[in-house]
Amino acid sequence: MEAADLKPFARYTLPEAHLVELPNYYRGKVRENYDLPDGTRILIASDRISAFDVNLAVIPLKGQVLTGVARYWFNETRDICPNHVIDYPDPNVLVSRRLRMMPVEIVVRDYLAGTTSTSILQMYKRGDRNLYGHAFPDGLRDNQKLPRTILTPTTKADQGGHDAPLSGDEVVANKLLTRQQWDQVSQVALRLFDRGRTIAATRGLILVDTKYEFGFDESGAIVLADEVHTPDSSRYWLQDTYAAKFEAGEAPDTFDKDFVRRWVVSQCDPYKDPIPPIPQEVILQAAAIYLNAYEMITGARFPLPDPSTAPLARVRENLKKYVGRAA
């Protein structure tokens, strides 16, 4: 799909979904959350795109892509780890079990890559050689395959804050998780990543790195939550062109949100300067990248919605049955 094909959807966006008829509202970076009295949580994926600790823009259909891709991967990985999914009443909505969330994000990496301050590439370029408890040799190149898959956990910052890097030992020493919990979630994360990497390869994709969020259910069991292997939580490269791009010292072909990140970095220092408005042609190109990502990852056509019905009105209609349960 090309950016020009999405012009009819240029204003078909869900910048937010604050529904006053639902209780216990919490606004995340890209999702609106509602906790119902019966222990379920409603997560509505907006079309906001977040990077550099700020919301950068609104990308048409992005929330539907993220919900659909996560749905695909939750189905593909449920034999590895239970997940929080209950229902999908709308293309942008997930109804889930409410969990006690882990206070750390688990990031798994296979390549020396990244544009944010906590990415191993940027830390490596600053001269750091001990990253997240892993020793790195001199002489590695941008976007090079790592000798082995590594875990790089971070703290979970509040909105507008910065995630802080941790080693596994620091996770335990700071009492964020017990040693048993850390060992268990590490094994689960590596198995999830291996499943994602294997399936992605059959689609002509390289799963470069990804972020997982886990929680605990009422029995203390570890449960996969939030999203999994989406273009927002993961970095994907095109397999066919990676080797040539790497040898030429060029950035790999990608279709995740690094496209928008790279545009911002080309305009300013996003951690020091005001971020300029993102032009509509960049917005529509990003939307096309998200839709193409959906189709490549899932192997299915993206179900374009009816543009005559506003996304918020559709979401509100599809969530009517939960309003009565909110009392």
Image (tube, grey):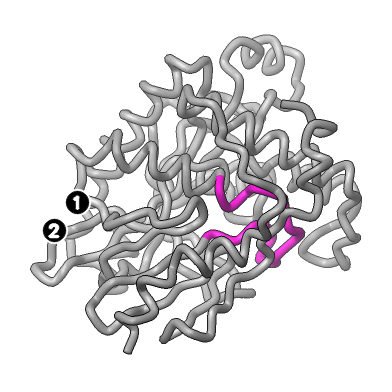
Amino acid bearing label 2: Gln
User: In the rendered view, would you say 118 is above or below 71?
Assistant: below
Q: Is residue 50 visible?
A: no
Taking the spot 60% from the left edge, 61% from the top edge, the residue there is: 46
Instruction: Please rate how many residues cluster around mark 1, counting C-alpha atoms within 10 Å: few if below 14, some from 14 to 19, many from 20.
Output: few
Taking the spot 13% from the left edge, 58% from the top edge, the residue there is: 180
Which quadrant: the N terminus? top right
Q: Is residue 223 visible?
A: yes
Answer left or right for 286 relative to 168.
right
Answer left or right for 49 relative to 260.
left
Name which quarter of the figure residue 239 lies in: top right
Residue 194: x and y, percent?
A: 32, 29
Separation of residues labelled 1 and 2 (CA atoms): 5 Å
Amino acid bearing label 1: Asp
Look at the image and say whether residue 255 sits in the magenta stretch. Answer: no
Taking the spot 50% from the left edge, 67% from the top edge, the residue there is: 317
Q: Residue furthest bottom?
A: 327
User: In the rendered view, would you say 188 is above or below 98?
Assistant: above
Q: Which residue is mark 1?
A: 183
Look at the image and say whether residue 55 sits in the magenta stretch. Answer: yes
Residue 167: x and y, percent?
A: 38, 56
User: In the rendered view, would you say 25 is above or below 221?
Assistant: below
Residue 247: x and y, percent?
A: 70, 12
The residues colored magenta run 45-64
Answer left or right for 40 relative to 113.
left
Q: Which residue is mark 2?
A: 180
In the image, 307 versus 246, the foreground residue is: 307
Q: Secondary structure at mark 1?
A: helix
Tell me how many marks there are: 2
Q: Secondary structure at mark 2?
A: helix
Answer left or right for 43 relative to 144.
left
Name which quarter of the figure residue 153 lies in: bottom left
